Amino acid sequence: MPAAIAVVVLPLAAAVVFTFSALALKRSAELGAGLWRTAFVSNVTSAILFGTLSFLGGPPVRADLLWQPACVAACLFVGLLAQFLALEKGDVSVTVPVLGLKVVLVALLTPLLTSDRVDERSWIAALVCVAGIAVFNRTPDGHRPRHIGITLLAAGGAAVSFALFDVLVQRWGPAWGAGRLLPIVYAINAVFSLALLATLPAPLSALPTAAWKWLVPGAVLLGLQAILFVGTLAVYGQATTANVVYSSRGLLSVAMVWLAGHHFANRERSLGPRVLAWRLVGAGLMLLAIVLVTVR
């Protein structure tokens, strides 16, 4: 697939899959999955899925460079924990758009950590994304999203960690190859996750069956969207463009909450039509950002 098409189509597909994953994981949290169980199951599931990329092959693994995937895995681990915390405590329609701040952070970090230059249109698109995120979170009816402080802090921290993750994958991915770097990164992330077992208030077997029914599909979908998005960065680079397209998950999360949230027992649609109207304005801004980086 040509790079110009791949960095649009694959991140957009990842955004769709991520939206369903977020709704499923949110529901599992409400049924008692908890932060640590969610993180452990999701990280191990992703490691298994990314392990299938080993068939792509690549250059021999150099032991003296294993610190690179270890650094990437650390960024991933911290980012996932913060993301799961935000989804557990706050609304999906707040958490997911705030995660879109990663777009601006990638634009800022790319020229500092790589030899790539971020063009003017990508900078403008990133700033438009921020404006869209701000509008998404406007609450004209006086509704204050629950746990808004911890939600914004956790989602913002996740955005920082994921931005570092994306830029480092873009920097080191081509030399390692997608069939080497990504399986190793996610395997290390799974090893980090073993430490979470000691924090569980009860064994995994104690988790209610109803929670498992949402947790497992949510974890699988999260891993699949990661393969689509992270694989794009490792193979094609262009982290800023890919992230602007991927940020459409903010728009998709709002739309899915309103159109299908009830199927996930999600109650955010009760926010009212005025909130929806403002978030549709935010959606327009996000679409404008996507056009800026995809139409040349």
Image: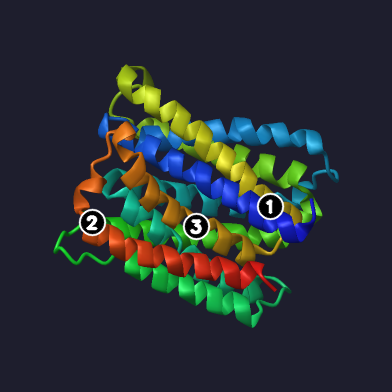
Task: Please tell me which residue is depicted at 56% across the width and 64% down the height of the picture.
Answer: 244
What's the amino acid at mark 2? Answer: Pro
- Residue 164 place in picture, x, y as percent: 56, 62
Of callouts 3 and 1, which one flags the residue occurring earlier in the amino acid sequence? 1
Q: CA distance from mark 3 to mark 2?
A: 21 Å
Name the outermost residue toward the bottom. 120
Residue 2: x percent and y percent?
Answer: 80, 56
Q: Is residue 274 left or right of residue 37?
A: left
How many residues crowd mark 1 within 10 Å: few (<14), some (14–19), many (20+)? Answer: many
| Distance CA(mark 3)–CA(mark 1) | 16 Å
Mark earlier in primary sequence (3, 2): 3
Q: Nearer the viewer, residue 77 or 92?
A: 92
Quarter location, residue 32: top left
SS at mark 1 in the image: helix
Q: Which residue is mark 2?
A: 273
Residue at (38%, 50%) from the top-left corner? Answer: 255
Instruction: Give me the residue at 49% from left, 44% from top.
Output: 18
Q: Identify residue for label 1.
A: 232
Residue 16 image position (x, y, % from top left)? 51, 45
Q: Tag 3, which secondary structure?
A: loop
61 on left or right of 21: right
Task: Give the crowd class for mark 2: few <14, some 14-19, many >=20 residues within 10 Å.
Answer: few
Name of the residue lying farthest toward the right? 59
Counting residues from the start of the chain, the first of labels 1 and 2 encountered is 1
Q: Which residue is mark 3?
A: 248
Residue 290 is left or right of residue 93, and the answer is right
Mark seen at residue 287: none
Q: Amino acid at mark 1?
A: Thr
Q: Is residue 194 visible?
A: no
Task: Name which quarter of the figure residue 202 lies in.
Answer: top left
